[in-house]
Image (cartoon, helix red, strand yellow):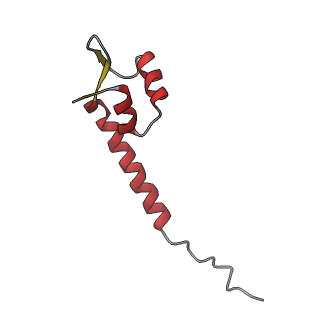
Amino acid sequence: MYLTIKETAEFLELPEEYIETLVHHNKIKTVYDGEQVLINKNQFQSHLEQMEKYRAMIQDYLSEPIPEDPDVKDED
């Protein structure tokens, strides 16, 4: 499936200007159909998988309880 630059920005949750910069610097593979630049959606699959892993890892870290300090109960 091919997306426009605007649709790609929404799909990746990134600013449209950033996607245009990546296209201009050939960091994203594109196809020009004579009217507009189209971007293949499948090329971002590994990026999205990595983002999901990082989100899960951060969520696990944030949900982990803070261990009690052993020196808190040590009163002289």
Place residue 29 in its image quadrant.
Answer: top left
- View extreme (left): residue: 1
Residue visible at 44% across and 22% down in the picture: 20
| Residue at image location 67% in from the left, 86% down from the top | 73
Task: Give the vertical position of 64 relative to 22 (above or below).
Answer: below
Query: Does residue 65 appear left or right of residue 53 in this picture?
Result: right
Front in this rendered view, residue 50 or 5 = 5
Q: Quadrant of residue 51?
A: top left
Q: x, y percentage for residue 50? A: 37, 43
Q: Nearer the viewer, residue 39 or 46?
A: 39
Say which of 60 and 40 sits in front.
40
Residue 4, above or below 52:
above
User: Horizontally, is 30 left or right of 15 in the view?
Assistant: left
x, y percent for residue 36: 32, 17
Where residue 6 sits: x, y (%)? 38, 30
Which quadrant does the C terminus fall into? bottom right
Instruction: Please provide percent x and percent y for residue 63.
Output: 46, 67
Residue nearer the viewer, 40 or 46 = 40
